[in-house]
Image (spheres, rainbow, N blue to C red):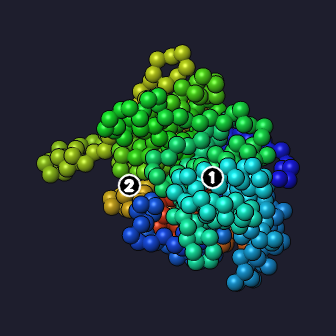
């Protein structure tokens, strides 16, 4: 393994200028998801892989490079785009790959650690154990070159057509694998079997790759509660599960954990214990949302845009609307359909504190944790108009990634949410137009303010995840310094 440049790993907010992150570009396994297994593998539909890559995800990589590592792409955009049938710049196993040390490809890290014979043998044994492989296949995999073996572990394909494992299509959602909390790394414990292999691969990477060597004693693993195997009829809330889409490092002293379909109360509790014992944060807020596929993670219903601006789904906020007085049908249907959101904040050496609504919590964070002197603004999914609020939340209108404070990425298909951003004073620009402006020195990405960047989304949105899901920030600039 080559010696990697030392990396500073530290995330103290959701909106400080992004300096480094982990991603995984769509691999061939995504093109092998079949309709009968799509939901087992946590997809809503099958995707067209080449469209997803060339017409959607590649623009995400280009944009990240212009913001985080411009030397890798500045002056090369025309050549990259001119090669219609050649994606070598985006392929991690190709000599022409961008190899950024700031926009970091998971497959590259996996290939790096597989060059170590001892690690390779252990990892092959571990993967083969959970996949039920024969001993003969295990020996064959041990003798496979590292670059090829990394591809096999991720795509499940031994050759161009021979599948030996199920694909792990959710690896593109790198956020779920772990979250950096200040200078610690909190690893996930997935709720679904479909994510077992990717979780195993990431544990090997975090504990063995030189990039994380200085942080190995700061990796937090959430273990199952003691003697869990003796409890009969274990309910979902009692299982110890936690996923990165439910974790938001909102301020240096404050982590939010969503308890959802994927993160249990038990998982949140175990994380809180360790975070407080290690004095990583001073408070952790639990936001309990309905256990429904519609809202699989907290970041599907709320993300941050600026220190005083948030985008969220109004129907889950918990705030009460004024009830109509003259329509019995509207009165009772509204009561009946009301989804319950519960919020409680745990603080070291203090009594827990509750919040009546999501807006109340977010306003408190903006004013108290982040020192905002401006009124807190809420931008609602679908502009809070039925049925567009629910339709656009389903296609990740609330799942945005901040490249810096006020500059966020979102899908181009959520028209009413885009209109709501405009009404709140944000500029709207399509990523293709923005890339040309940056390349031609007409726009400096670091001078941009209050902008929603629209990303192509026809195929990516089928996977039920937005750009917040498709990123694992490793380092953000301190929000105090970036203001």
> Which is more toward the observer, 461 or 450?
461
Q: Residue at x 77, y 53 (%)?
A: 117
Q: Is residue 127 visible?
A: yes
Say which element carries label 1.
Answer: helix
In percent of width and height, residue 204 lies at 67, 47
**Residue at (58%, 24%) from the top-left corner?**
276
| Residue farthest along the front direction in this orientation | 136
Local secondary structure at mark 2: helix
**Label 2: few (<14), some or many (≥20) within 10 Å?**
some
Given residues 278 and 307, the one toward you in this image is 278
Q: Quadrant of residue 149?
A: bottom right
Residue at 52 percent across and 57 percent down: it is 132
Does 55 sit above or below residue 231?
below
Q: Earlier in the sequence, mark 2 or mark 1?
A: 1
Tell me if residue 372 comes above or below residue 293 in the rendering: above
Category of crowding for the residue at label 1, using alpha-carbon neighbours closer than 10 angstroms: few (below 14), some (14–19), many (at least 20): some
Residue 260 figure quarter: top left
On the question of residue 451 being in view, the answer is no
**Towards the viewer: 200 or 3:** 200
Q: Which residue is mark 2?
A: 294
Relative depth, front residue between 139 and 346: 139
Indicate the quadrant containing the C terminus: top left, top right, bottom left or bottom right.
top right
Q: Position of residue 147 (x, y in %)?
A: 74, 64
Image point (65%, 32%), residue name: 252
> How far across and down, in percent of the image, does residue 320 sit?
31, 40
In the image as oriented, which residue stretches furthest toward the top?
349
Q: Nearer the viewer, mark 2 or mark 1?
A: 1
Looking at the image, residue 250 sits to the left or right of residue 111; the answer is left
* Numbered circle sitting on residue 32: none
281, above or below 417, in the image: above
Residue 125's disc number: 1
Relative to 268, does residue 132 appear above or below in the rendering? Answer: below
């Amino acid at each position: 393994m080559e010696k990697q440049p030392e990396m500073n790993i530290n995330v103290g907010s959701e909106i400080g200028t992004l300096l480094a992150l982990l991603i995984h570009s769509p691999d061939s396994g995504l093109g092998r998801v079949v309709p009968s297994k799509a939901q087992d593998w946590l997809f809503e539909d099958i995707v067209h892989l080449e469209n997803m890559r060339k017409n959607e995800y590649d623009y995400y990589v280009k944009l990240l490079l212009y913001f985080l590592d411009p030397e890798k792409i500045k002056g090369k955009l025309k050549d990259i785009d001119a090669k219609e049938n050649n994606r070598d710049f985006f392929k991690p196993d190709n000599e022409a790959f961008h190899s950024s040390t700031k926009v970091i490809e998971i497959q590259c890290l996996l290939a790096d650690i597989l060059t170590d014979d001892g690690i390779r043998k252990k990892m092959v044994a571990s993967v083969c154990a959970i996949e039920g492989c024969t001993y003969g296949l295990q020996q064959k995999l041990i003798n496979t070159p590292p670059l090829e073996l990394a591809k096999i572990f991720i795509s499940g394909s031994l050759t161009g057509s021979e599948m030996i494992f199920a694909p792990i299509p959710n690896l593109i959602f790198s956020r779920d694998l772990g979250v950096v909390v200040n200078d610690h790394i909190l690893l996930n414990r997935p709720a679904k079997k479909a994510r077992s292999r990717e979780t195993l691969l990431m544990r090997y990477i975090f504990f063995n790759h030189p990039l994380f060597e200085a942080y190995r004693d700061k990796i937090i693993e959430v273990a199952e509660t003691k003697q869990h195997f003796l409890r009969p009829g274990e309910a979902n809330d009692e299982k110890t599960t936690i996923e990165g889409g439910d974790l938001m490092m909102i301020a240096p002293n404050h982590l939010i954990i969503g308890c959802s379909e994927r993160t249990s109360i038990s998982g949140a509790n175990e994380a809180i214990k360790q975070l407080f014992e290690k004095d990583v944060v001073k408070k952790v807020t639990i936001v309990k949302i309905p256990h429904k596929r519609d809202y699989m993670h907290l970041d599907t219903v709320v993300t941050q845009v600026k220190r005083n601006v948030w985008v969220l789904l109004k129907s889950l906020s918990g705030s009460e609307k004024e009830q109509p007085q003259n329509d019995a049908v509207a009165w009772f249907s509204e009561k009946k359909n009301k989804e319950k959101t519960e919020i409680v904040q745990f603080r070291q050496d203090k009594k827990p504190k509750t919040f009546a609504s999501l807006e109340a919590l977010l306003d408190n964070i903006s004013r108290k944790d982040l020192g905002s002197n401006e009124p807190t603004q809420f931008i609602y999914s679908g502009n809070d108009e039925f049925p567009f609020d629910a339709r656009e939340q389903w296609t990740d209108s609330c799942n945005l990634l901040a490249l810096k404070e006020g500059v966020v990425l979102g899908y181009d298909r959520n028209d009413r949410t885009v209109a709501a951003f405009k009404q709140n004073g944000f500029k709207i620009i399509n990523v293709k137009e923005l890339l040309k402006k940056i390349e031609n020195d007409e726009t400096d990405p670091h001078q941009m303010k209050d902008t929603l960047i629209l990303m192509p989304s026809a195929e990516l949105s089928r996977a039920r995840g937005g750009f917040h899901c498709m990123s694992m920030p490793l380092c953000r600039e301190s929000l105090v310094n970036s203001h």
